[in-house]
């Protein structure tokens, strides 16, 4: 009985990362850009856990670092959405093309 | 074909489709729902990798907390953001600025990653037993105690920072 190999997970994680990057680059809505970043972090997590499962004698360190990545992602999305809400209140837009406060 | 491989392909197909829809669907709220599907699929993949604790945390943190935050942010931000992001899909794909450039960069990165995986042989390692919650907790609180403390300080800082940023703008408007 053969389950999915390490390469299966690596290719899927790479595809998900690139789709997240595509979403983050393509979208103009700041909330959607944050969604793309979350997807990229999640794909990196999948890579981390797959490496720990298949290519390391002890999977515990890889899984613990995946937990830390989740903590960082949660903190990032909380602060990012607070900034988006502050922008939506003050500038009445979440379009990143119109947010040029520091652009001069 | 074993059931693990079948489950992997089903989960991968669902996740790739919903991840693609996150990038392309016009409605912001629909994109959030597709992102939730991707997160649930990721929890299924963690189960396939025998990381049961991570699967539970994935559902709790991403589907429970992050998705709630995102949906609240969509509801609270400008109502115009709920309207379609921009014009028809085909025109966006063909436009030089918003179609080709992100697509080209993403495809280039994907090709590079595939080339890197293909050109480097994977080492043969004796696989260890997957850690349970007990073993994971022991590792986090002994070997990785410093990253754990840094993560907790980071979460506290993010909590205070998010409160300060979201509040001050309101007081400034009054």
Image (cartoon, coloured by chain):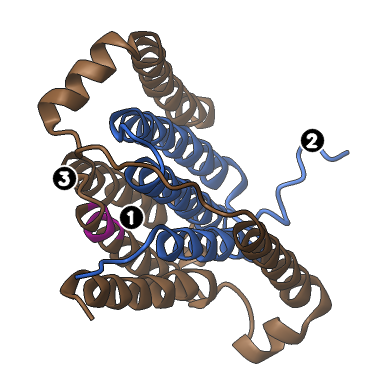
| Residue A19 shown in magenta | no
Residue B152: name its quadrant: top left
Q: Residue at x 18, y 34 (%)?
A: B131
Q: In 3D space, how far apart are the residues under numbered discs 3 and 2 (Cα atoms)? A: 45 Å
Task: Provide the secondary structure element on which disc 3 rests.
Answer: helix
Q: Marks 2 and 3: in contact by CB < 8 Å?
A: no
Percent coordinates x, y for residue A58 in the rendering:
31, 31
Per the rendered image, the range of residues in magenta is B42-46
What is the C-alpha distance between the residues marked 1 and 3? 27 Å
Distance from Cα at disc 1 to Cα at disc 2: 28 Å
User: In percent of the image, x 24 and y 12: which residue is there?
Assistant: B141
Shade of chain A as shown in the rendered figure:
blue
Q: Are marks 1 and 2 on the same chain?
A: no
Q: Is residue B15 left or right of residue B91?
A: left
Q: Chain of mark 2?
A: A
Q: Position of residue A69 (x, y in %)?
A: 41, 34
Q: Which residue is mark 3?
A: B52
Q: What residue is disc 2 on? A: A102
Q: Which chain is brown?
A: B
Sequence-first tag of 1 and 3: 3
Residue A79 seen in this snapshot: yes
């Amino acid at each position: 009985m053969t389950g999915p190999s390490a390469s299966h997970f690596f290719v899927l994680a790479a595809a998900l990362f690139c789709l997240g990057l595509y979403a983050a680059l393509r979208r103009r809505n700041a909330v959607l850009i944050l969604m793309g970043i979350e997807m990229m972090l999640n794909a990196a997590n999948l890579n981390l856990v797959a490496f720990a499962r298949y290519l390391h004698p002890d999977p515990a360190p890889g899984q613990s670092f995946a937990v830390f990545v989740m903590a960082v992602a949660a903190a990032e999305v909380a602060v990012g959405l607070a900034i988006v809400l502050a922008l939506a209140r003050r500038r009445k837009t979440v379009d990143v093309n119109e947010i040029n406060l520091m652009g001069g | 074909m074993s059931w693990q491989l079948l489950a992997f392909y089903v989960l991968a197909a669902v996740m790739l489709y919903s991840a693609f829809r996150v990038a392309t669907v016009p409605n912001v709220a629909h994109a959030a729902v597709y992102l939730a599907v991707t997160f649930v699929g990721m929890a299924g993949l963690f189960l396939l990798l025998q990381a049961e604790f991570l699967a539970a945390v994935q559902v709790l943190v991403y589907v429970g907390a992050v998705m709630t935050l995102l949906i609240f942010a969509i509801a609270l931000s400008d109502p115009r953001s709920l309207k379609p992001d921009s014009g028809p899909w085909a025109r966006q794909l063909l436009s030089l600025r918003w179609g080709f450039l992100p697509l080209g960069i993403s495809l280039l990165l994907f090709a590079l990653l595939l080339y890197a995986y293909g050109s480097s042989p994977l080492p043969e390692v004796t696989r260890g037993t997957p850690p349970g919650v007990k073993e994971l907790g022991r590792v986090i609180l002994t070997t990785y105690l410093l990253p754990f403390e840094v993560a907790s300080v980071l979460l506290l800082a993010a909590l205070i920072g998010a409160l300060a940023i979201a509040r001050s703008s309101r007081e400034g408007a009054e």
